[in-house]
Image: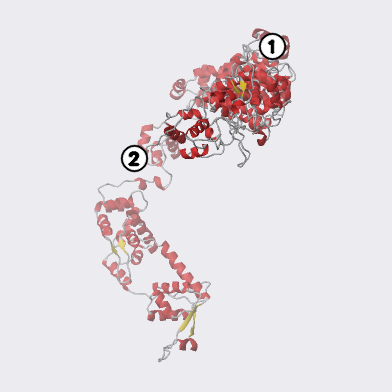
């Protein structure tokens, strides 16, 4: 690998010098033109000089360092770092300080390429933007004839044939700034941002300068530049007036204009937050109109390009001019002001932390003194908490997530809240939303609204709750115009758990009208402290049952609202004793208490939730409370042990026990039933020992009828007792018979036990099988047994299926039936005397037959070996052809004929297709023709002669056959009948296995 050659003639790079300037100095040192020297170094020859400080790759910089002997990384300081925020006004030209050029020997500083470098702090002057000779920007194009011109010379020429300008840039007149000039301070601030250790912060600050350039140029006037000198004021007067289009936004800005922009924008973007917002507010008020979010003269793209801190200052400065909905959406009254972002998970997730009605404590703080319904305000205020940070502009679309039933009164509610003389209501709402986003809520209201049942309290639970707290539950009201108190209790508990709006018609227990609402409010006022505590305890039980590990209620703390000018006082800022005296003791309306204590009705309702109220003392014996106390005393006496001792074992009647204890008999009956004690309306039943009954039924397999006869009761009594003992009953009918449950001695042959156990008529089948095997066929055996042959077939098929084996070979003509090896084994087992005894005991006399004697067997053999003439065929019912006797060969022929039913055929074709011999086939075809299944014709002369072999005769003529429609029906009928019969005919297990194999 060859080593990199180092240039023999080199010059050092100055501190702060740009790469373009250093490369030009190297080209001059080596006596080459600038473009030619770039080619020697292998660098791209771009006609724009600026590309040398903004478009050189890192690998090329490392190569240059190696070729020139510079330390690695040195040239990174001579180029603009990647990603530098140039903005739309990307510098095509390079500004310069004539004095610096002269002092540096015509070498150019890198910072002069920066858009926000406009002054030389060392010499206290503005930088020049153009050549003093030709008036064009300098170093726009790559200097081409550098070997012919001295450094710091303008090389501009309008075309390739014109001479260069040649003006000496070091001789340009100075543009002095007075010591302490604001633009020098602005340049110092820019330099500090560029060299800031936090690159991201510096990047954001410079990007913000670009974004607000157009707005500053439209907003700042010459009157704001007093004291900056005529040079700056004249330059500001020449500034572009309109930068809205892309072409306008890339116009070159003079150094003085850049300086004024930085000077005006610096307090807006940096420094003290309050001072920056105040400065922004004074500028925004010059041009902005009411309802404007983005400052006038700033495009949406420029607004989006601002950093989040800069946008926050702009939003807070324009807060008072924005609409109420926008103030909420942008959080402009708070230090957390921001532009809404689509898909912000914290904003969309906020609905889970919101009740439908604003928390009671915050209702006290935010509810206006007058001019608004409390329930409507609470619903809309809670829905308004969905607005902060929401990108969706439609307020209705946002609030419908929580309140689709509310009227479109959001704007009116906000206006009345703001007109109440307390401007910090919006600030409090925004602060609430921010608190929920940052800290969340321990309660997931959305889950509760789904999981908590609409009626979390039953009527009986409410009654027990009231009785336990010494209160009357209220009478059951049947009139449709009235609502029972337990329904109000359900509403109260559901609203307590879910924060639901009871005016929402989606809830089954929603308030129907104003009258219903008034009665519900009266119910909440009438709740005693023990009742409230009991309802709260029941609410916690409901949450535990749903697996919700959350506090019963919660609301955000009020600390961050301290110092805000809100309509209401702090919820704790009220005299609870005064509220108790006015509302509870003096029985005056809550509205009077609000007026007397100079607060709102919402505050009084909130206070009543915390005022201690004791229940009224009830002494009447006929009241529901007295009845409940009687039942409570009875439950302590009528325990299971007491009832078992006195009633079950003692034999006393319920009436006797009721008289002895002084309680009504119906209470005693209720407790006995609740404890699962059997109540006898008549005499007590016969006692049956549980263990004995289980042994007889389960172990000995006795039927319920047998047990009932032994005990002396009905069969149904035994069955009912078994059910009480949770003993599974055997099915009624055949499965409970003794013969089905009997188990044979294991010493008996296995096949005998298998054929008998768990079945009916097993002995009968075995007995018939033993006799049948002595005969040559089933027909002769059926004649001897006085049974139908089909019955024997069914019985023996069942026997073979139970034993899973073929027991005998079926008979054919002149070949008697005979047992298989398994059948012979079964016959040997049946011949044992113990088996015969069991068989005789199981069968009736009509079922028992003696084994046939020799005479009976000889007669059976004679009948078996005598061939009987076939019976006449029964004609078809609806097919007008003669019926023929169909054998296997005929079936093959019929299948082929049906497959070729639409064509004529002759015998040789069918023989070739089916394999039936020609001699046998001719007989079958003539038989079918005689039975009118086929028609035939003799081959005509033309066809016959065409088949003749040359030199020989034509041979025999062919006979062509055609299947008649009636013959087709008959053939289909025969095939269908044979197939159905073959499909339904069962095979012995052994033969079935052979057939499968």
Spot occupied by residue 521 in the image (x, y as percentages of width and height): 68, 20
Question: Which element carries disc 1, helix, strand or loop?
Answer: helix
- Choose between 94 and 174: the one closer to the eye: 174
Would you say 629 lies left or right of 785 here? right
Q: Tell me the crowding category of disc 2: few under 14, some 14 to 19, or many 20 or more residues within 10 angstroms, Cα based.
A: few
Residue 583 is marked as 1
Q: Nearer the viewer, mark 1 or mark 2?
A: 1
Q: Would residue 622 be visible to someone looking at this image?
A: no
- Kindly give the residue lying farthest to the front in the view shown: 148
Would you say 667 lies left or right of 738 here? right
- Look at 44% across and 73% down and name the residue there: 896
Work out whether 114 lies above or below 805.
above
Residue 736 found in image quarter: top left
Spot occupied by residue 877 in the image (x, y as percentages of width and height): 52, 71
Residue 356 found in image quarter: top right
Residue 378 is marked as none
- Choose between 729 and 367: the one closer to the eye: 367
Q: What colouring style does the render use?
A: secondary structure
Task: First in sequence, mark 1 or 2: give its number.
Answer: 1
Spot occupied by residue 549 in the image (x, y as percentages of width and height): 51, 23
Residue 263 found in image quarter: top right
Would you say 52 lies left or right of 799 here? right
Task: Name the residue beneath numbered marker 2.
Answer: 700
The N terminus - image quarter: top left
The C terminus - image quarter: bottom left
Q: Would residue 782 be visible to someone looking at this image?
A: yes
Real-space CA distance between mark 1 and mark 2, rounded to the nearest whole angstrom: 79 Å
Q: Tell me the crowding category of disc 1: few under 14, some 14 to 19, or many 20 or more residues within 10 angstroms, Cα based.
A: some
Work out whether 439 lies above or below 786.
above
Spot occupied by residue 185 in the image (x, y as percentages of width and height): 61, 18
């Amino acid at each position: 690998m060859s080593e990199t050659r180092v240039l023999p003639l080199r010059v050092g790079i100055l501190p702060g010098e740009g790469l373009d300037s250093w490369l030009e100095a190297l080209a001059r040192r080596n006596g080459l033109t600038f473009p030619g020297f770039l080619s020697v170094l292998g660098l791209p020859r771009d006609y724009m000089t600026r590309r040398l400080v903004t478009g050189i790759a890192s690998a090329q910089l490392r190569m240059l360092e190696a070729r020139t002997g510079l330390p690695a990384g040195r040239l990174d300081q001579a180029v603009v770092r990647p990603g530098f925020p140039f903005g739309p006004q990307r510098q095509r030209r390079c500004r310069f300080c004539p004095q610096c050029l002269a002092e540096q020997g015509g070498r150019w500083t890198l910072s002069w390429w920066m858009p926000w470098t406009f002054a030389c702090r060392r010499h206290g002057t503005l930088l020049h933007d153009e050549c003093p000779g030709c008036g064009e920007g300098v170093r726009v194009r790559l200097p081409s004839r550098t070997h012919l011109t001295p450094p710091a010379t303008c090389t501009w020429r309008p075309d390739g044939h014109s001479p260069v300008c040649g003006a000496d840039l070091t001789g340009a007149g100075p543009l002095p700034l007075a010591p302490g000039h604001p633009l020098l301070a602005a340049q110092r601030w820019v330099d500090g941002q560029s060299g800031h250790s936090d690159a991201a912060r510096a990047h954001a600050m410079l990007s913000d300068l670009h974004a607000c350039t157009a707005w500053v140029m439209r907003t700042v006037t010459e009157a704001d530049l007093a004291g900056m000198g005529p040079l700056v004021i004249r330059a500001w007067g020449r500034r572009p007036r309109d930068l809205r289009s892309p072409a306008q936004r890339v116009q070159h800005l003079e150094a003085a204009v850049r300086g004024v922009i930085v000077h005006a924008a610096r307090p807006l973007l940096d420094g003290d937050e309050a001072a920056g917002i105040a400065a922004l507010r004074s500028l925004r008020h010059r041009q902005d109109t009411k309802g404007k979010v983005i400052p006038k003269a700033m495009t949406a793209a420029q607004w989006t390009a601002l950093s989040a801190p800069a946008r926050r200052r702009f939003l807070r400065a324009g807060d008072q001019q924005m609409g109420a909905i926008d103030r909420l959406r942008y959080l402009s009254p708070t230090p957390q002001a921001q532009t809404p972002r689509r898909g912000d998970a914290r904003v969309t997730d906020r609905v889970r932390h919101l009740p439908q009605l604003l928390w009671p404590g915050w209702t006290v703080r935010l509810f206006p003194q007058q001019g608004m319904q409390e329930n409507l305000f609470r619903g809309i205020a809670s829905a308004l908490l969905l607005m902060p940070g929401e990108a969706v502009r439609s307020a209705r679309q946002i609030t419908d997530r929580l309140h689709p039933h509310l009227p479109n009164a959001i704007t009116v509610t906000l206006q009345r809240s703001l007109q109440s003389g307390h401007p910090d209501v919006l600030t409090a709402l925004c602060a609430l939303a921010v608190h929920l986003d940052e800290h969340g809520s321990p309660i997931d209201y959305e889950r509760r609204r789904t999981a908590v049942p609409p009626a979390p309290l039953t009527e009986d639970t409410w009654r027990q709750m009231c009785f336990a707290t010494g209160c009357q539950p209220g009478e059951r009201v049947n009139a449709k115009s009235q609502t029972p108190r337990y329904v109000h209790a359900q509403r109260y508990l559901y609203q307590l758990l879910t924060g639901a709006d009871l005016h929402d018609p989606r809830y089954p227990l929603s308030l129907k009208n104003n009258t219903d609402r008034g009665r519900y409010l009266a119910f909440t006022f009438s709740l005693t402290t023990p009742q409230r505590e009991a309802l709260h305890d029941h609410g916690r039980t409901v949450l535990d049952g749903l697996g919700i590990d959350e506090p019963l209620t919660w609301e955000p703390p009020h600390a961050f609202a301290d110092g805000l000018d809100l309509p209401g006082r702090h919820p704790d800022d009220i005299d609870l004793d005064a509220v108790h005296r006015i509302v509870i003791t003096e029985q005056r309306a809550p509205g009077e208490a609000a007026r007397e204590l100079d607060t709102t009705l919402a505050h009084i309702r909130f206070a009543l939730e915390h005022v201690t109220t004791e229940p009224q003392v009830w002494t009447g014996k006929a009241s529901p409370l007295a009845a409940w106390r009687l039942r409570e005393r009875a439950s302590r006496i009528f325990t299971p042990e007491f009832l078992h001792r006195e009633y079950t074992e003692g034999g006393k009647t319920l009436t006797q026990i009721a008289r002895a204890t002084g309680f009504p008999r119906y209470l005693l009956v209720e407790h006995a039933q609740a404890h699962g004690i059997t109540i006898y309306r008549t005499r007590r039943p016969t006692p049956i020992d549980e263990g004995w009954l289980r042994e007889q039924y389960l172990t000995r397999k006795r039927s319920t009828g047998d047990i009932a006869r032994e005990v002396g009761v009905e069969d149904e009594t035994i069955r009912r007792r078994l059910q009480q003992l949770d003993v599974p009953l055997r099915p009624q009918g055949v499965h409970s018979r003794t013969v089905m449950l009997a188990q044979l001695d294991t010493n008996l042959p296995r096949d005998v036990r298998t054929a008998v156990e768990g079945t009916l008529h097993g002995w009968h089948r075995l007995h018939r099988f033993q006799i049948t095997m002595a005969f040559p066929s089933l027909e002769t055996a059926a004649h001897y047994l006085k049974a139908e042959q089909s019955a024997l077939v069914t019985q023996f098929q069942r026997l073979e299926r139970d034993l899973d084996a073929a027991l005998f070979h079926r008979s054919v003509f002149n070949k008697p039936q005979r047992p298989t090896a398994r059948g012979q084994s079964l016959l040997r087992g049946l011949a044992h005397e113990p088996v015969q005894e069991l068989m005789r005991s199981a069968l009736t006399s009509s079922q028992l037959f003696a084994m046939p004697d020799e005479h009976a067997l000889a007669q059976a053999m004679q009948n078996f070996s005598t061939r009987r003439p076939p019976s006449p065929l029964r004609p078809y019912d609806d097919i007008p052809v003669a019926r023929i006797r169909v054998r296997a060969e005929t079936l093959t022929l019929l299948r082929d004929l049906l497959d070729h039913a639409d064509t004529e055929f002759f015998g040789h074709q069918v023989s070739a297709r089916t394999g039936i011999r020609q001699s046998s086939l001719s007989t079958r075809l003539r038989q079918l023709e005689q039975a009118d299944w086929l028609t035939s014709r003799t081959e005509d002369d033309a066809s016959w002669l065409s088949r003749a072999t040359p030199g020989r005769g034509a041979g025999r003529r062919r006979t062509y056959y055609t299947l008649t429609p009636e013959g087709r029906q008959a053939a289909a009928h025969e095939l269908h009948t044979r197939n159905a019969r073959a499909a339904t005919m069962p095979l012995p297990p052994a033969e079935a296995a052979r057939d499968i194999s």
